[in-house]
Amino acid sequence: MAESPPLKLQTFDLAELLAWYEQNLCACTLKDPRGHEVRFDTCRFAYIIKLRSKTGKKVKKPSKTAEQIRAGKLGNCDFGGFDAERAATLPWIPMIILRPTLIATNKNLLIPGDELYVKELDKAGYRYKVLYCRRVSATLLVPVTSFPRSKIGNLAEGILWP
């Protein structure tokens, strides 16, 4: 069942985004309907918002990058940008985990991760938000990436939930 998403974040300052990410995702226990925990840490921040180096490539040392952003040593001007929609929709991630439309095995070889969480959204534009996760143990997953999609098609291989 489609659900209206929370409000988008209105900041595009990396230090503010990182602070929000740490407070609202890293510091929280987020369990899916199966009782499996999805645990966030700062090393995933750069990938979740698709932060790019000045040359447009993936950030190479995401943990160190997050530390330097937190310390005020790096800011927006030190990077080649990030995906504004991914950053603005960070507040949507908890509902994807807590109340997913479905959880499935990832069959996309181009996107790493073992499982994906899909949330159908009641909004115009793209209709789904997807969170890809890597399984660490029987009941623990860590996020890999998250982004919007207009349709899910045959995105998922095997439905794990519901």
Image (cartoon, helix red, strand yellow):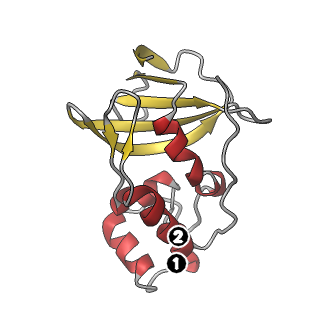
Amino acid beneath label 2 = Lys
Q: Position of residue 11 (x, y in %)?
A: 66, 69
Q: Residue at x 57, y 75 (%)?
A: 76
The percent position of residue 120, horizontal first and vertical second, equals 63, 28
Q: Could you classify mark 2 by the number of other residues whose Cα lies within 10 Å: few (under 14), some (14-19), or many (20 or more)?
A: few
**Residue 141 located left or right of residue 117:** left
Tell me whether the residue at label 2 lies in contact with that at label 1, contact meaning CB atoms closer than 8 angstroms. Answer: yes
Tally of numbered discs: 2
Q: CA gap, disc 2 to disc 1? A: 7 Å
Disc 2 is placed on an element classified as loop
Q: Is residue 61 visible?
A: no
Which numbered dot is residue 78? 1
Considering only vertical position in the picture, is 14 above or below 141?
A: below
Within 10 Å of disc 1 (Cα), the crowding (few <14, some 14-19, many 20+) is few
- Assign the C terminus to one quadrant of the image: top left
> Against 144, is 41 above or below?
below
Residue 108 in percent (x, y) is at: 43, 25
**Could you tell me the amino acid type at mark 1?**
Asp
Residue 144 figure quarter: top left
Q: Which residue is mark 2?
A: 54
Of residues 151 and 160, which is closer to you in this image?
160
Quadrant hosting residue 23? bottom left
Specify the quadrant of the image occupied by residue 143: top left
Q: Is residue 153 above or below residue 129?
A: above
Foreground disc of the pair 2, 1: 1
Picture residue at 42% right of the left edge, 15% below the top: 157
